Structure formats: C-alpha cells, structure tokens
Amino acid sequence: MPQRPRFPSRLPPLAGSSPVQPDESTPAHAHAWDMRAIPYMGDSVGFSSERYRLSMIEQIRLSGVEDLRVLQAMLKVERHRFVDSALRVQAYEDTSLPIGAGQTISKPNVVARMLSLLLQAPIYLQKGLHQRVLEIGTGCGYQAAILSLLCKEVYSLERIKELHLKAKSNLRPLRLPNLHLLLRDGAQGYETGSPFSGILSAAGAEHLPRIWIDQLDIGGRLVAPVQNQAGRQSLLVIDRTPSGIKEVIMEDVHFVPLKSGIE
Ligand code: SAH
C-alpha cells in the first residue's frame, strides 16, 4: 500500500486561491462540532456552513486520510450545495445521499480516500501537480469541484443527461474554469483529452475498461472501484510505469455500477 504523506495534525484556515498547497506555517483552525445539534441547514441569509465542514474534515482525518491538500480542498467546497434542499441537514454527515436518476453522491470519507490516492501518483510526486485528470461519473459535481482545486485541468464525464445538467447548474456559481463537464460514456474514456496524469472512476466496473489504462500518461495513476471475485467491489490503484502496469488492490468499497451508453 502506498505511503501517505504525514502532515501536521492541525488545519490552516481556508486558502484564498487554487490549486491548494500545503502550508505548514498558518495558525491552527480545527474544532470538534456536534453534528447532531444542527436543526436545519438552508440557504438562509447569514448561514455559515464552514463549521460543519470543519467537523466533517475532522471525521475524515480520524478515518485516516491526513493529506492536507485534500482536507483543505474539501473544506472549501460546500457539499450542501450539491444535494437537494430536503437533504441538506445531512450534507456534512459521512453518508452517501441520493442525487436523482437513482445515483448517489459519494461519502466524504470515500472521496477523500480516492483523492489522496490520486495525489500519490508517481507523476504527481515528481512534478508536484496533476496536469490533466479524468473523472468518470460527474454525478452532482461535488468531487469534480474538489478535483478542480487540486489539478490543473479536470475533465469529468457523465452518461445521464439529467445529472450532467444538474452538475452544470450546481457548479456554475463556483466559476471553475479548469473544470470541463462532458455528457459522454466514460467507459470509453476520453481520447481527446488524453494522456491523463490521473483517472478516477466514481462508478464500479465489472471489468476494468482497458482503454482507461491506455489513456494514462507514464507515471499516471488510475483509482477505480472494480468488481472482485467475491462479487463485491474493491478499490483498485493502477500505476502506468515506464516498465509496465503496477496494480494494487485496496479495501472493499460500494459504488454505483459503471454502465454504458448515454441516457
Ligand atoms: N463523483 C460523483 C459521484 C456520482 S455517482 C459525485 O460527487 O456526486 C457515479 C456516477 O457515475 C453516476 O452519476 C452515474 O450516472 C455515473 N456513471 C456510471 N457509468 C458511467 C459511464 N459509463 N460514464 C459516465 N458516467 C457514468
């Protein structure tokens, strides 16, 4: 299992610009908050969701993801903006939530884990940046927004038009010019944008599409849930190295299935 970098156990305040860089000199800013105390979370004037995100970040860190770049980026993106208003009260709990069309927004812990694995790509360790990243499964656009703070260019594919449009409208106010949303079948990858330094799938394939590996740059990393022999899903990390493919099977995960075609 790849080593995760060690970072200070305290979070700096929100950074002003992207991409997010670790900054060990800024003052501490972490608190424990009781999520059960939230009566209602809406768009009411003056509502500040930052403290709920801090609590979420604390939970993520306790679950073992300590990558400060990931934690900082997740602190900046308001998850409650990506779910229906009736579900906003749950937006900062570690749970997946329905986003329409039978799909779900992934658990924050899982998003953090996938992103921290992606940032361990050999090419990232060499160059300190992901140039081009492909996300398969835009869904509501939450993970895509976080990715756009961590990578130079992000291409995110969604096969369901309703969700592609929903993600567009969720993301419009955030003005993320390096995030490109496309209505496409991600099982085919995205040849035009390749090679990618990172590929991340938010949908679990029965068999990993070979084309994803073909579209990886040398030193690039693919992180994807794939069905295992027991019929469950495992998280797979594949590195394309100058001498071939290196594959590591991680923990069991639960993602919606990767399907083909456009709906
Ligand atoms: N990252 C998303 C998670 C969405 S769930 C978020 O933050 O909300 C996974 C998504 O993958 C679903 O929206 C589903 O429609 C999509 N998906 C499944 N198969 C796909 C395919 N072949 N191409 C593109 N998207 C796909």
Image (spheres, rainbow, N blue to C red):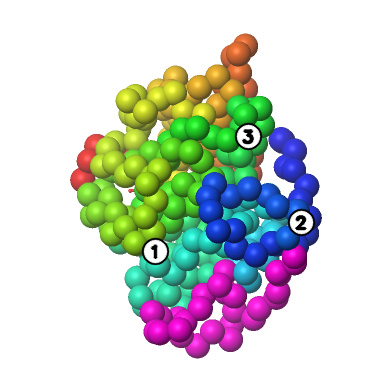
Is 50 colored magenta in this rendering?
yes
Tell me whether circle 2 and circle 3 mark residues in contact (CB < 8 Å): no
Q: Magenta segment, principal secondary structure?
A: loop
Badge 1 is on which residue?
A: 82
> For residue 43, what is the image quadrant?
bottom left
Q: Which callout, 2 or 3, points to the residue nearer the camera? A: 2
Determine which of the numbered discs, if any, sits on residue 128 in the image: 3
Q: Is residue 76 left or right of residue 54?
A: left
- Residue depicted at 43% across the width and 75% down the height: 88
Q: Position of residue 100 (x, y in %)?
A: 30, 61
The residue closer to the viewer here, 226 or 222, is 222
Where are the magenta residues, as a range?
A: 27-53
Amino acid identity at mark 3: Gly
Alpha carbon distance from label 1 to label 3: 29 Å
Say what secondary structure mark 3 lies in.
loop
Determine which of the numbered discs, if any, sits on residue 182 in the image: none
Badge 2 is on which residue?
A: 25
